Image (cartoon, grey):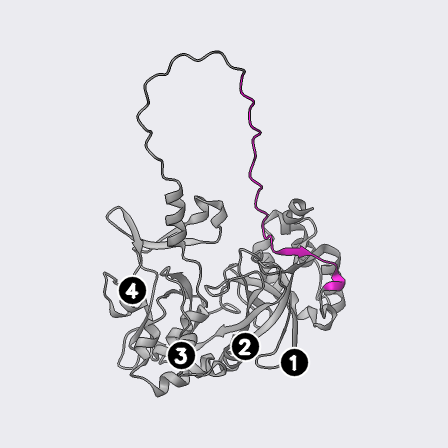
Amino acid sequence: MRARRNPWLLLALLLSACTVQPPAEPPAAPPTPAPAAPPVASPVVLPTPALPYPTLKPVDWSAVTSWRDDAASEAWPAFLQGCTTLGKRSAWQAVCAEAGAMTAPDDAAVRAFFERRFQPWQATQEDGSAEGLVTGYYEPLLKGDRERSARARFPLYAAPDDLVSVDLADLYPELKSLRLRGRLVGNKLVPYPARKDIEAGSNGFRGKPVAWAEDPVELFFLQIQGSGRIELPGGGHLRVGYADQNGHPYQSVGKLLVERGELTLDQASMQGIKDWGAKNPDKLPELLAANPSYVFFRELPNGGAGPLGALGVPLTGGRSIAVDPRFVPLGAPVFLATTQPNSPLPLNKLVMAQDTGGAIRGGVRADFFWGFGDAAGELAGRMKQRGRMWVLLPKDYPLLSVRR
C-alpha cells in the first residue's frame, strides 16, 4: 500500500469554506435616491459537471498493444465471476447475459466478444501520461491459532465496535471513494488510534481477536495483502479477509529502511524487509510502528476459490488486479501491458479490476494478484514494474454518453 490523501484535512478545509459570517450591523437608512433604471441581470454560470473517470481516453482496438498475444480464454472464468455482481447493474446486464450463454469459448471467440461488445479506453495519469506503476500481491499462509498460545502471540483484530466510518461522497460528491474513519469522543469525531496504540492496547483501544499469528512480520504483510490463511495446529486452515482499516495513511517501511541506509532500493522488497527483520529483531517493533495504518480482519468461508476482493467476488490468480476506483470502474476488464517481476520479459494479460487497496492510487496503477502460497509471494514481493492499461467498457456504458 501507499499513502493516501488525508480525508481529515480535506474535511476541515471544506467545513471552513462553508462557515457563515455573521451579518454586520445595518447602517442608518440613507436618503431616498432618485429612481434608477432597473439593473441588468448577470448571466447565471452553472458549474461544469465533473466527468466520471476523466483520465480515460477512447481509442481504437488497434491501439491496445499486444491485445492478440494473450491467451484470452484463461481470463473468461474471472470475467464470469465478476458478472455475478456486475450482471445486476443495468450497464452490464446485456454483456454479462451474452457471456453467460457462451460455452467454453476459445481465445479467438473471447477476443471477438470483447471487440464486438466493448470500447477500449486508454488509462492515463492526471498529467496525461500513459505509464504507471504495477506491483503485486498474493494470499499468504501464516502459522497461528484461534486462541492465544505460547507460540501464537500476535492478534488479528476484528473491526472494533467504536470505529466510525463516514462516506464523504454522501456530503460532497467530489470526494467519492474517500472515507473518514474515527471514533466518537463526546459529540466529536476524532482520529482512531494508530498502529502503535492498537498493538500496545493503549489510547482506549480494546480489540477482539479473530485469531493469533506466530510471526509479527508475517502478520504485518498479511495486513498489506488484505487477506490470507492461518494454518492451525491441527492442520486445518482459517481464511481471513479485510474487514476495515483505522483511517491512518499507509507509510512504506521499505522506503523508510532505504532512507535510513539500512537497505538499498533493490533490496526493499517484501523478502528483503523480512530478512532485515530477522536480523534486527530489536529494531523491528519501532520500524513496524512507523506505519500508522492498521487493518482489521473477519473470518471468511474456507470453500471459496480465492480471497474476496472489493467487488465481492473471489479473486483469480493471474487474472485479477486491484485498481483505484476513482479512475477505473470496479469490475471492468482491463488489458494490462507490463513486464515480469524484475525482468524485461513481457507480461501482457486480460485481467479484471476486482479489488482495491490503500496504496493503489492513480489513473495508471495496478496491483497484480498472483494467487496463493509461497511461490505467488515470491513473485508478488519482487514486482515493481512500469505498465500501461486499457479499460474495456460496454459500448452503451453511461460514460460514453457523457463524453461524446
Q: Secondary structure at mark 2?
A: loop
Residue at 47% across, 11% down: 34
Disc 3 marks which residue? 257
**Up-down relation of residue 355 to residue 16 (above or below):** below
Residue at 52% across, 77% down: 380
Q: Are marks 4 and 2 in contact (CB under 8 Å)?
A: no
Query: 236 or 205: which is nearer to us?
Result: 205
Label 3 amino acid?
Leu
**Marker disc for residue 345:** 1
Q: Are marks 4 and 1 in contact (CB under 8 Å)?
A: no
**Marker disc for residue 370:** none
Q: Secondary structure at mark 3?
A: helix
Q: Secondary structure at mark 1?
A: loop
Mark 2 is surrounded, within 10 Å at the Cα level, by few (under 14), some (14 to 19) or many (20 or more) other residues, namely many
Q: Which residues are magenta?
A: 38-63
Q: Earlier in the sequence, mark 3 or mark 2?
A: 3
**Spatial separation of the CA atoms under disc 4 and disc 2:** 34 Å
**Up-down relation of residue 286 to residue 15 (above or below):** below
**Spatial separation of the CA atoms under disc 2 and disc 1:** 12 Å
Disc 2 marks which residue? 383
Image location of residue 232, percent across then percent down: 37, 78
**Marker disc for residue 208:** 4
Residue 7 is one of the magenta-drawn residues:
no
**Spatial separation of the CA atoms under disc 3 and disc 2:** 18 Å
Mark 3 is surrounded, within 10 Å at the Cα level, by few (under 14), some (14 to 19) or many (20 or more) other residues, namely some
Which secondary structure dominates the residues rendered in magenta?
loop
Is residue 138 among the parts visible in the rendering? Answer: yes
